[in-house]
């Protein structure tokens, strides 16, 4: 095996992608890793796992290219708002561009045949490889023996005999391999992508039903606080903890309205993009209801935004009165 054969791995940092990288580097392939960043998933897991493997990692921001997938992914969504097949295609396309620009011989992933019913069945693996634009150069080392030989195998760049035949949802063989490779520090299989998180996915769907244009900040905002949709259409976000209040304050944009109850501990309340008089009143009711003020007591709410600050005096409602607005 020539030490000059270079493989570029699309790397989530999960155990499968770690094993795929290790299987190849064990054969003498010069392995580098590539991970992607959007508001839904970040590079932290990949950074940590690449460091465990001692392999170089590139991090590429793809949010702008990802946006269209949120609306009309060609191959649909999973259980949440996760367009996994289209997402894999996008990542492999991005990886193919790096491969071609930087002289890598082939791409690889940690996909395992049959592990995910939607995105890793045989047909999906084929679609993804085809969508990459370089189907013959996409190697899945963990399931390669169950798949048609790719160019790297046919050319002898990698030894197919030393690739694997993993399939299905079980994790037993992966755990055994991890043990064999001395990999003890790897992340749990769950997590890593907010689009598969039921709470985040529900908020995102609701947002997309009201907005055809979304900004990164809208997507960040979905990670924090309680979200309400007022009858007239505006969105209101109510911080749940001090940390959330701080996070919301950090996401303020020009035009937003911010409300706080005066003299009583309570949440930071945000109307992204502002709202009319009615929205302001409803948001003030939410601010009061989620403050420490007792229902029925009078409170004053300070509203600040692009115009002069306003003070609104109102009776604190019961939370239950406003529950139907909650997203
Ligand atoms: S879980 Fe998220 S990051 Fe992973 S393929 Fe699906 S959409 Fe992409």
Image: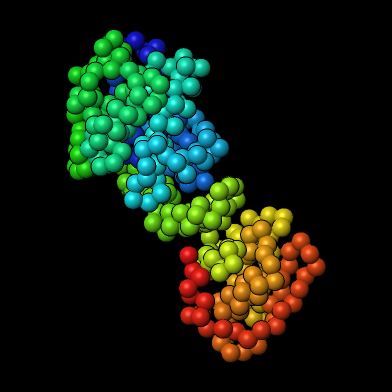
Colour scheme of the picture: rainbow
Q: Is any atom of residue 285 visible in this view? A: yes
Q: Residue at x 49, y 22 (%)?
A: 98
Q: Which residue lies furthest to the right in this view?
A: 308
Question: In screen coordinates, is 47 left or right of 113?
Answer: right
In this rendered view, identify the residue nearer to me: 206 or 192.
206
- Measuring from the top left, give residue 184's x and y in whole percent: 31, 42
> Does 112 appear above or below 102?
below
> Does 89 appear above or below 276?
above
Among the 4 quarters of the image, the one containing residue 144? top left
In this rendered view, identify the residue nearer to me: 325 or 6.
325
> Does 219 appear above or below 61?
below
In this rendered view, identify the residue nearer to me: 239 or 23.
239
Q: Which residue is drawn at 61% across and 74% down?
A: 282
- Measuring from the top left, give residue 13's x and y in whole percent: 39, 38
Q: Which residue is drawn at 47% across and 44% down?
A: 70
């Amino acid at each position: 095996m020539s030490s000059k054969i270079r493989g570029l791995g699309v790397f989530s940092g999960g155990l499968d992608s770690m094993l795929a990288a290790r299987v190849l580097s064990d054969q003498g392939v010069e392995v580098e890793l590539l991970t992607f960043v959007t508001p839904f998933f970040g590079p932290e897991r990949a950074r940590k796992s690449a460091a465990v493997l001692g392999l170089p990692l590139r991090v590429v921001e793809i949010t702008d290219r990802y946006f269209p997938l949120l609306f009309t992914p060609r191959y649909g969504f999973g259980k949440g708002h996760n367009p996994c097949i289209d997402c894999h295609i996008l990542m492999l396309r991005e990886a193919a561009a790096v491969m071609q620009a930087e002289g890598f011989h082939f791409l690889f992933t940690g996909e395992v045949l049959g592990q995910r019913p939607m995105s890793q069945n045989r047909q999906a693996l084929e679609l993804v490889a085809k969508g990459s634009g370089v189907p013959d150069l996409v190697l899945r080392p963990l399931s390669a023996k169950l798949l048609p030989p790719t160019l790297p195998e046919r050319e002898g760049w990698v030894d197919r005999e030393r690739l694997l035949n993993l399939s299905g949802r079980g994790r037993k063989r992966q755990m055994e391999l991890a043990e064999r490779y001395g990999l003890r520090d790897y992340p749990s299989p769950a997590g890593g992508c907010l689009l598969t998180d039921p709470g985040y996915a529900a908020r995102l769907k609701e947002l997309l039903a009201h907005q055809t244009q979304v900004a990164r900040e809208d997507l960040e905002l979905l990670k924090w606080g309680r979200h309400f949709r007022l009858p007239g259409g505006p969105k209101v976000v109510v911080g749940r903890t001090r940390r959330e209040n701080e996070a919301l304050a950090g996401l303020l944009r020009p035009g937003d309205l911010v409300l706080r109850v005066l003299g009583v501990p309570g949440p930071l309340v945000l109307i992204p993009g502002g709202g009319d008089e009615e929205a302001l009143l409803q948001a003030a009711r939410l601010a009061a209801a989620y403050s420490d003020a007792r229902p029925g007591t009078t409170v004053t709410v300070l509203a600040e935004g692009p115009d002069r600050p306003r003070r609104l005096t109102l009776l604190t409602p019961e939370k239950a009165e406003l529950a139907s607005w909650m997203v």
